[in-house]
Amino acid sequence: MFPADALVSSPRAEKARLYSAIEQRLEQSLKIMDGIISSRVHVSYDVDNGDSGKTALPIHISVLAVYEKDINPEIKINDIKRFIVNSSASVQYENISVVLSKRRDIIEQAPTYEISEPVFAYDKAMPVSILLALISVATCWLLWKYRAILTNLVRLKIK
């Protein structure tokens, strides 16, 4: 996403790379928490960060976590918020939003396939092909055998 081989790296690119790494690290850490299967972390930050003389906007963090065990969601949300607020000095507790989603129960069943007759059945096509070949050979043989009669008939029609 952020090529490290760029000759000149801008401060904004460095900041974006840093926040992306922070998001990934927080996601990995949240997955270690008991009951959390997967997580996504989004950090919203001020690109200028007060560099242009304006006051910096506060950082907001959103967390989407999927859990599987029967846990109390309120307690898990508080645990996640406490973890996030303690992982960064500039994040306020009110600026963290957490959405928990319980993993759906997956019914494990082997896939079933309806066995149907193929569109082109070779077991039926083979006898038909042999019959057509025999008819073609017989027709050619008859035409060869009676070629003299056929040529005389053609000559009579021409005259």
Image (cartoon, rainbow, N blue to C red):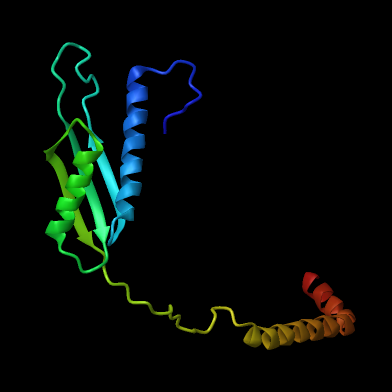
In this rendering, the answer to whether 107 lies above or below 91 is below
Where on the picture, by quarter, is residue 125?
A: bottom right
In this rendering, the answer to whether 26 lies above or below 138 is above
Q: Nearer the viewer, residue 136 or 48?
A: 48
The percent coordinates of residue 13 (x first, y second) are 36, 23
Picture residue at 31% right of the left edge, 43% below the top: 26
Picture residue at 16% right of the left edge, 21% below the top: 56
Answer left or right for 157 relative to 10: right
Q: Residue furthest top?
A: 53
In this rendering, the answer to whether 6 lies above or below 132 is above
Where on the picture, by quarter, is residue 95?
A: top left
> On the rendered image, what quadrant is the N terminus found in?
top left
Picture residue at 32% right of the left edge, 53% below the top: 31
> On the rendered image, what quadrant is the C terminus found in?
bottom right
Answer left or right for 97 relative to 31: left
- The total of numbered circles placed on residues is 0
Picture residue at 81% right of the left edge, 79% below the top: 153
Q: Nearer the viewer, residue 70 or 8?
A: 70
Answer left or right for 1 relative to 95: right
The percent coordinates of residue 108 (x first, y second) are 37, 77
In this rendering, the answer to whether 9 lies above or below 22 is above
The percent coordinates of residue 10 (x first, y second) are 37, 17
Answer left or right for 17 relative to 79: right
The percent coordinates of residue 4 (x first, y second) are 47, 26
Q: Nearer the viewer, residue 113 or 66?
A: 66
